[in-house]
């Protein structure tokens, strides 16, 4: 087969920093590095980012399948500027399953429920976006630049072409988990029938394929994460002396926070929340269409936010350790490790041509 | 106790959850819409709910309103290239259809033999006094020649600039294999769009586990001939297809269902 796109799938989060090689948290040779250097977030990376924009964009845009795992923020690389480091191609966008639950379920008021479920802006909105009512009452152009960019990104993407919606279901499973514990099976049935209704509606409205993890796969992923779970004390023993660990636990010195760390980690073991990016990767890994595709990821999934980010229900470190095992075993590839070779392949193939032609 | 045990301990409730969380909302199947003269019933719902729909007729079948409107992959023939003709279209309704089909689809499939052979031969001295015969090796020569490759690149550039779609075609080896599989006794055999598209489906690993449904099959009892005049040559390129013979080949494809009447 000859194709203008390479046979690979790329999962993109909203990070715009990277290290040249995937960082194994247990690799003691990097333990002396300050956080910025360890994680790629140091200021001296800025120049490298500028240089990297072209190569990342062209490699990503010449991939057969690009999954945007972080709502629509990835195109704008975090700061909602015109940066274009991670290309423009989008084949699947990730939809937060929170939107599927609808506002009405909290109050059981049908009116609000429908509104929450069928709001089409949910499909393409960014995390901090506004409701449609606010959009209409407050014209976008009258807002400050940083807010306007969010809307612009949303608008552009909603008009751009994407084939599929991949739904992350952490919020749904968290709610179901609570209901299971309460043995409130009627409510579970009620929620599920309405989730089904919403998905049918989305399918009907957008004629897009909708993928998600079925319960068997979701629970399997949760168990895989828990295989890499460590208690707070175990982590302290294992990572003690690493500068990155000191950074992640920097708020431990805050007397108000100190007592919460153990509880947070312990709660993560029993939480049904799974990072949306990881859910998207697992959808891709289990999609038979991509069986013999090369699979790439970019960046980190928030280990520095283990104790400081709002929703601390994700077990960031266990998820990171699971990703490390997948990269070690070759299930996944870390794009920055291969970007220079892939970029060179692209340039060689483009000689006297507009687009590379891949043969596989 | 694992956090997931609370779910697994309630298999009946888990079954309810499973029944509402389909992995895909569209069915994992491929529909190939050929360019026949459709007279069957309305199969729009079946086609629109398929994960991949490949149209070989530039969307003309959409006008019947019975063969759905979803389009993921578009087969484009070099000699009947819709985007170049968009502005010339007199019929507004067809114009609308063409535009909408290009907006919806993400991929273009090209018949490598047709445009490579023809374009290469246009600039070739070799066939001024010699009747060319299509084969995988000739396509390979064309592929590797500077002029053949640059024309191909220009063509792809044009397609890409206008549509930003992925463009795919069979390699010359795969094309050779197709000729061999069809078992044609003719020189200059040109596989029909349907045979070519089904070969592409077979080679594309995405569809390995998918069921394939063929609608609106072009039926013809006689062999189809296409005459392409070659500039600078005293010969024409006479291409021949044998739909009946191809039918025996494609009907033996595994996982392929040819729907000549209504689907049950």
Image (cartoon, helix red, strand yellow):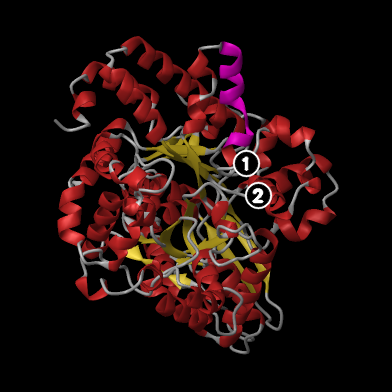
When asked about the image quadrant of residue B62, the answer is top right
Residue sitting at 65 percent across and 51 percent down?
A153
Q: Residue at x 71, y 55 (%)?
A: B82
Q: Are marks 1 and 2 on the same chain?
A: yes
Decide if residue B181 is in sight here: yes
Which residue position holds label 1? Answer: A129
> Splitting the image into 4 quarters, where does residue A293 fall?
bottom left
Q: Quadrant of the N terminus of chain B?
A: top left
Residue A337 in the magenta stretch? The answer is: no
In the rendering, at what x and y percent does residue A310 appear? 44, 42
Q: Are marks 1 and 2 in contact (CB under 8 Å)?
A: yes
Mark 1 residue crowding within 10 angstroms, few (<14) / some (14–19) / many (20+): some
Quick one: which residue is furthest to the bottom in this view? B125
Examine the structure image and report whether residue A119 is included in the region drawn in magenta: yes
Question: Which chain is indicated by disc 2?
Answer: A
Tell me which residue sits at (59%, 84%) in the image.
A352
Is A177 left, or right, of A280 in this rendering? left
Residue A343: horizontal and vertical position, in percent? 47, 77
Numbered range of the magenta stretch: A110-122
Q: How many marks?
A: 2
Q: Main secondary structure of the magenta part?
A: helix
**Residue at label 2?**
A150
Q: Nearer the viewer, residue B199 or B28?
A: B28
Give the spatial CA distance, label 1 vs label 2: 7 Å
Q: Give SS at disc 2.
A: helix
Residue sitting nearer the eye, A171 or B171: A171
Q: Which element is circle 1 on?
A: loop
């Amino acid at each position: 087969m000859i194709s203008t796109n390479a046979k690979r799938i790329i999962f993109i989060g909203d990070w715009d920093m990277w290290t040249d090689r995937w960082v194994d948290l247990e690799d003691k040779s990097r333990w002396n590095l300050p956080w910025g250097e360890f994680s790629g977030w140091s200021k001296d990376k800025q120049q490298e980012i500028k240089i990297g924009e072209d190569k990342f964009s062209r490699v990503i845009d010449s991939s057969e399948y690009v999954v945007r795992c972080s709502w629509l923020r990835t195109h704008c690389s975090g700061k909602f500027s015109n940066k274009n480091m991670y290309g423009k191609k989008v084949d699947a966008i990730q939809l937060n399953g929170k939107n599927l639950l609808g506002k009405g379920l909290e109050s059981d008021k049908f009116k609000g429920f429908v509104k929450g479920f069928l709001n089409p802006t949910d499909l393409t909105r960014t995390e901090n976006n506004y409701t449609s009512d606010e959009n209409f009452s407050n014209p976008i152009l009258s807002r400050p630049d940083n807010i306007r960019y969010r809307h612009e990104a949303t608008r552009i993407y909603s008009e751009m072409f994407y084939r599929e919606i991949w739904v992350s279901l952490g919020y749904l499973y968290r709610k179901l988990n609570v209901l299971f514990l309460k043995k409130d099976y009627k409510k579970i049935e009620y929620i599920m029938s309405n989730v089904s209704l919403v998905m049918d509606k989305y399918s009907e409205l957008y004629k897009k394929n909708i993928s998600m993890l079925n319960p068997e796969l979701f629970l399997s992923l949760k168990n895989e994460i828990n295989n890499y779970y460590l208690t707070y004390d175990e982590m302290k023993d294992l990572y003690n002396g690493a500068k990155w660990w000191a950074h992640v636990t920097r708020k431990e010195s805050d007397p108000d926070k100190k007592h919460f760390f153990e509880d947070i980690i312990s709660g993560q073991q029993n939480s049904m929340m799974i990072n949306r990016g990881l859910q998207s990767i697992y959808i891709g890994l289990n999609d038979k269409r991509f069986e013999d595709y090369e699979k790439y990821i970019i960046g980190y999934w928030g280990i520095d936010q283990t104790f400081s980010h709002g929703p601390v229900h994700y077990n960031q470190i266990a998820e990171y350790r699971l990703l490390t095992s997948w990269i070690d075993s070759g299930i996944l590839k870390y794009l920055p490790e291969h970007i220079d070779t892939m970029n060179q392949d692209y340039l060689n193939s483009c000689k006297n041509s507009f687009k590379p032609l891949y043969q596989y | 106790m694992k956090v997931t045990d609370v779910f697994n301990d309630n298999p009946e409730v888990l079954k309810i959850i499973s029944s509402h969380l389909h992995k895909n909302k569209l069915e994992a199947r491929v529909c190939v819409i050929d360019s026949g003269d459709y007279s069957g019933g309305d199969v729009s719902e079946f086609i629109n709910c398929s994960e991949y729909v490949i149209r070989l007729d530039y969307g003309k079948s959409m006008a019947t309103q019975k063969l759905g409107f979803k389009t993921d992959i578009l087969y484009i023939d070099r000699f009947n290239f819709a985007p170049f003709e968009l502005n010339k279209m007199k019929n507004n309704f067809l114009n609308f259809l063409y535009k909408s089909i290009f907006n919806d689809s993400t991929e273009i499939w090209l018949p490598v033999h047709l445009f490579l052979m023809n374009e290469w031969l246009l600039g070739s001295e070799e066939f001024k006094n010699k009747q060319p015969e299509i084969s995988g090796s000739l396509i390979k020569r064309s592929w590797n020649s500077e002029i053949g490759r640059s024309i191909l690149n220009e063509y792809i550039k044009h397609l890409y600039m206008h549509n930003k779609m992925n463009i795919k075609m069979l390699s010359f080896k795969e094309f050779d294999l197709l000729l061999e599989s069809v078992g044609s006794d003719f020189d200059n055999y040109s596989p029909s769009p349907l045979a070519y598209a089904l070969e592409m489906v077979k080679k594309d690993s995405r569809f390995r586990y998918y069921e394939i449904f063929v609608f609106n099959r072009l039926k013809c009892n006689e062999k189809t001939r296409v005459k392409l005049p070659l500039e600078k040559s005293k010969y024409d390129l006479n291409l021949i297809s044998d739909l009946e013979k191809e039918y025996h080949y494609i009907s033996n494809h595994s996982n392929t269902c040819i729907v000549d009447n209504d689907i049950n």
